[in-house]
Amino acid sequence: MSKEQYLKFLLIFCPVLNLLCGVFIDLYAPSLVDLSHYMSTTISMSQNTITATVLGYALGQLFFGILSQKIGNRNSVIMGLCIFSIFSAGAIFSHSIILLFI
């Protein structure tokens, strides 16, 4: 892949990657009532998982913005996607609201 093709790819990929936060929250929000019943917690505690998610995205952007200056954009995006995938898979297996927050 040439440098021009790579830059065009990044020009499209990075905004799409940033939009994933909104897409995941829109997919997640309708299940908050079921989540509160499954986890035996209140709906407000379930709603706080969205706050934790947005906070995680904000801190992640700050952290990976600094990291991308040190190790490069490509490597920081790959590392961020790997971490996101691991924690998303971990959310599937959480059986308490505290583990889901983590």
Image: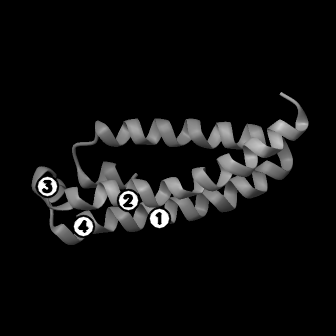
* Nearer mark to the viewer, of 4 and 1: 1
Q: Which residue does the image show at 68% across and 49% down from the upper left?
A: 12
Cα–Cα gap, marks 2 and 4: 16 Å
Give the residue type that dot 2 points to.
Ile
Q: Does any portion of residue 72 appear in the rendered image?
A: no
> Where does residue 84 sit, x and y in percent of width and height?
51, 43
Q: Quadrant of the N terminus?
A: top right
Which residue is label 3 attached to?
34
Sequence-wise first label, 3 or 1: 3
Q: Residue at x 88, y 40 (%)?
A: 4
- Tell me the amino acid under the disc marked 3: Asp
User: In the image shown, does 78 or 99 lie closer to the viewer?
Assistant: 78
Labels 4 and 1 touching (C-beta < 8 A): no
The answer to whether 1 is drawn above or below residue 68 in the figure is above
> Residue 25, which numbered label?
2
Element at label 2: helix
> N-terminal of the two: label 4 or label 1?
4
Task: Report helix, strand or loop for mark 1.
Answer: helix
Residue 88's disc is none
- Neighbour tally class for label 1: few under 14, some 14-19, many 20 plus, Cα within 10 Å: some
Give the residue number, with chain letter if any, for mark 4.
45
Q: Are marks 1 and 2 in contact (CB under 8 Å)?
A: yes
Distance between the Cα atoms at labels 1 and 2? 9 Å
Determine the CA span between mark 4 and mark 1. Answer: 15 Å
What residue is shown at x 17% (from left), y 68% (from top)?
A: 43
- Mark 4 residue element: helix
What residue would you read off at disc 1?
A: 54
Residue 26 placement (x, y as % from top left): 35, 60
